[in-house]
Structures are given as structure tokens and as C-alpha cells.
Image (spheres, rainbow, N blue to C red):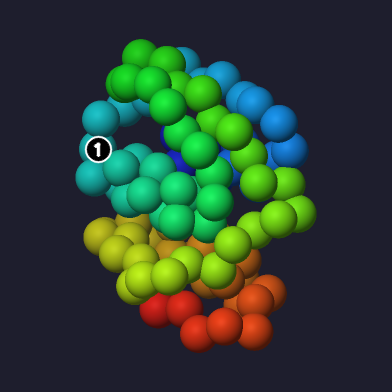
Amino acid sequence: QAIRSILFAALAQGKSTISNLPQSPDVQATVDFCREIGARIEGDSYRVEVHGVGRDLHAPKQEINVGNSGLLLRLAAPLLAMHNEKSTL
């Protein structure tokens, strides 16, 4: 649920607050991906504030490492497909 929460907050317009995120490589990969598409994420493991991009989703400038997160791969791929720029996951 943490991956979905972070990703949906990054795609929303405005600020979202998420508490009690687990510390895991998959969650960190999601935070990194969301930052790469333009979201601003601040905070720590207890509470993060996500400033979403709304419809102003940016194409990543570098290869995105999703680690072993199949969920992030499945959710990120169609988002990146909306751009005319090449992206690598």
C-alpha cells in the first residue's frame, strides 16, 4: 500500500501527507521514481509530504531503477508511455 500511496500522491495536484511508511528498497525506489517525474518529497520514515505534479508529469532524464518492485514496474511503465520521450525502467 505504501508504493501506491506515494505514487498516487505524486500524481495528485497539491500536497499529500503519508505516515508510517515501511523502510524497504521498494518504497525507496518509488520515492526515487516520483522525484524523477517531478514530485517533491520531503520527510522521514514516519511522515512524508508529497507535493504532486498533477498533469505536469516530467519524463525522467535518466534510467529508472525499480529494483525488485514488480508493482512499481507495472504502475510506472504506462505513466512513462504517455510521453514521446524514451524512458528506461
Residue 53 placement, left or right of 88: right
Depth check, front residue: 74 or 30? 30
Viewport quadrant of the C terminus: bottom left
Residue 27 placement, left or right of 58: left
- The correct choice, above or below, for 7 with respect to 16 in the image is below
Q: What residue lies at 26% left-to-right and 60% top-to-bottom?
A: 68
Residue that mark 1 sits on: 24
- What is the x, y in percent for residue 42? 42, 27
- What is the x, y in percent for residue 64? 35, 66
Q: What residue lies at 33% left-to-right and 61% top-to-bottom?
A: 66
- The correct choice, above or below, for 62 with respect to 52 in the image is below
Q: Residues within 10 Å of mark 1 (few under 14, many from 20)?
A: few
- What is the x, y in percent for residue 10? 59, 42
Amino acid at dot 1: Ser
- The correct choice, above or below, for 11 with respect to 68 in the image is above
Question: Does the image show residue 1?
Answer: no
Element class at badge 1: loop
Depth check, front residue: 11 or 58? 58
Q: What residue lies at 73% left-to-right and 47% top-to-bottom?
A: 54
Depth check, front residue: 5 or 52? 52
Within the image, what quadrant is residue 80 found in?
bottom right
Question: Does the image show residue 51?
Answer: yes
Depth check, front residue: 65 or 59? 59
Across the whole image, how many numbered discs are drawn on residues?
Answer: 1
